Image (tube, grey):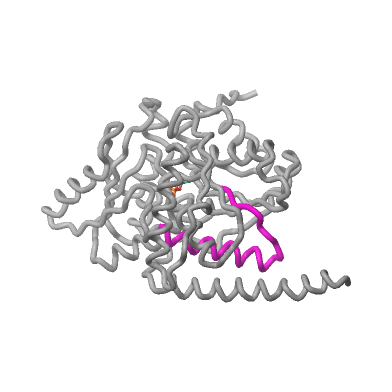
């Protein structure tokens, strides 16, 4: 062993020790917040060997938050463990939330409310203008109703927060104790779920001797990325985090994430310092708009279905993957060995977009 190698061998465990103690400290900080078990954790971390081979870039891994178990799973489950616990603690019996027609957040919220014996009201905003019967009735909308929620529609561009407030006032007059969850479950309480996910992922990687260079995922209402930014900062991780935007332009998206990460970091003990440069969003893969298909998304979903047997969704994770694949081709990850894609779920929405894929009939 050369002297440098000896030094490296001595340093590596020290670094692991620091990470382990910071992870433990973060667990203790998170344990101060009420949390109800709604999902299966930790979610698996798996290699995507066929995809890595086809793309010829870094080794690709997938963090399976599509496997959280709650009504076909997805990233909202981690947020809802904290949000629903807060609702229960505040004595609520009725949950109100909002989203786009094919909202995965709405679907997971309806399931969580059912499990906790709460009434659930969902307001769905028509952001795409689609009249495809599958889009407006199948996929997540079917599951919202199956879980027993009251589902109503709102037009594009309505003030959804005001709509939720006015519904809450109506329900309160009828004696209900309402609790409003913001769109995507993205406030500091919800973001705690992804603070914890950062810790979970780093511990998982350490256990299998994996050094993660970058973590990529779809970013929308910003709670997922804000939580990850905060969690990674808390454990002093140098993982390069990249959000792929699905709606807002870059400056707005990064601003939303930074704002929520700062607020989330402030409620932790000890307080975590968030630096603006750790917030990165690439918003070049949105296409014509939120929820509207792109060729890159369609190609990415087909590629993953046919190389890895994995299902991604047209609105979020499919566009996130499109960004990942294109950025690998453009050399963004050059020099990195291991890149993890956080699978945020959403495959139930595929059934709302069946026309999009132009698949052939029977042979
Ligand atoms: C909500 C959602 C996202 C985005 O997460 P945010 O916390 O809203 O940024 C990504 N993927 C899927 C499948 C989602 O449902």
Quadrant containing the N terminus is bottom right
* Residue at the image point whose x is 59% and y is 54% from the top: 63
* Residue at the image point whose x is 56% and y is 24% from the top: 358
Pick the residue in front: 7 or 40: 7
Pick the residue in front: 168 or 113: 168
- Count up the numbered dots: 0
* Residue at the image point whose x is 13% and y is 57% from the top: 175
Residue 177 x, y percent position in the rendering = 19, 59
> Can you tell which quarter of the image residue 156 is in?
top left
* Residue at the image point whose x is 56% and y is 33% from the top: 297
Q: Is residue 242 left or right of residue 10?
A: left
Does 194 appear in magenta? yes
What's the magenta region?
A: 191-216
Residue 211 x, y percent position in the rendering = 69, 60
Pick the residue in front: 5 or 30: 5
Does 363 appear in magenta? no
Residue 354 x, y percent position in the rendering = 50, 30
Secondary structure, magenta segment, majority class:
helix
Q: Is residue 339 left or right of residue 101?
A: right
31 to 261, vertically: above or below:
below
């Amino acid at each position: 062993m050369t002297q440098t190698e000896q030094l490296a061998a001595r340093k590596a465990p020290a670094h692991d020790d620091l990470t382990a103690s910071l992870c433990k400290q973060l667990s203790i900080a998170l344990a101060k917040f009420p949390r109800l078990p709604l999902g299966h954790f930790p979610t698996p971390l798996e290699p995507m060997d066929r995809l890595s081979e086809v793309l010829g870039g870094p080794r690709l891994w997938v963090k399976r938050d599509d496997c959280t178990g709650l009504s076909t799973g997805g990233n909202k489950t981690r947020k809802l463990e904290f949000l629903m616990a807060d609702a229960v603690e505040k004595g609520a019996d009725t949950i109100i939330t909002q989203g786009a027609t094919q909202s995965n957040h709405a679907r997971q919220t309806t399931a969580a409310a059912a499990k906790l014996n709460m009434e659930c009201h969902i307001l769905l905003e028509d952001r795409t203008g689609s009249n495809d019967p599958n889009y407006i009735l199948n996929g997540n909308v079917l599951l919202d109703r199956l879980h027993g929620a009251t589902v109503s529609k709102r037009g594009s561009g309505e003030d959804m927060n005001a709509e939720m407030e006015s519904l809450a006032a109506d329900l309160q007059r009828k004696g209900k104790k309402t609790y409003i969850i913001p769109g995507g479950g993205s406030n500091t309480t919800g973001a705690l779920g992804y603070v914890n996910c950062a810790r979970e992922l780093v511990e998982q990687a350490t256990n299998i001797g994996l050094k993660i260079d970058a973590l990529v995922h779809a970013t929308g209402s910003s709670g997922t990325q804000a939580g990850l930014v905060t969690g990674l900062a808390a454990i002093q991780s140098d993982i390069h985090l990249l959000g792929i935007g699905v709606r807002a332009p870059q400056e707005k998206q990064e601003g939303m994430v930074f704002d929520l990460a700062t607020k989330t970091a402030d409620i932790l003990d000890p307080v975590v310092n968030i630096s603006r440069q750790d917030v990165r969003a690439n918003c070049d893969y949105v296409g014509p708009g939120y929820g509207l298909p792109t060729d890159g998304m369609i190609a990415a979903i087909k590629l993953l279905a046919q190389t890895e047997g994995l299902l991604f969704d047209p609105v979020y994770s499919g566009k996130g993957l499109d960004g990942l694949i294109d950025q690998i081709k453009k050399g963004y990850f050059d020099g990195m060995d291991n890149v993890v894609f956080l699978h945020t779920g959403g495959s139930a929405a595929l059934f709302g977009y069946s026309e999009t894929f132009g698949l052939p009939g029977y042979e």
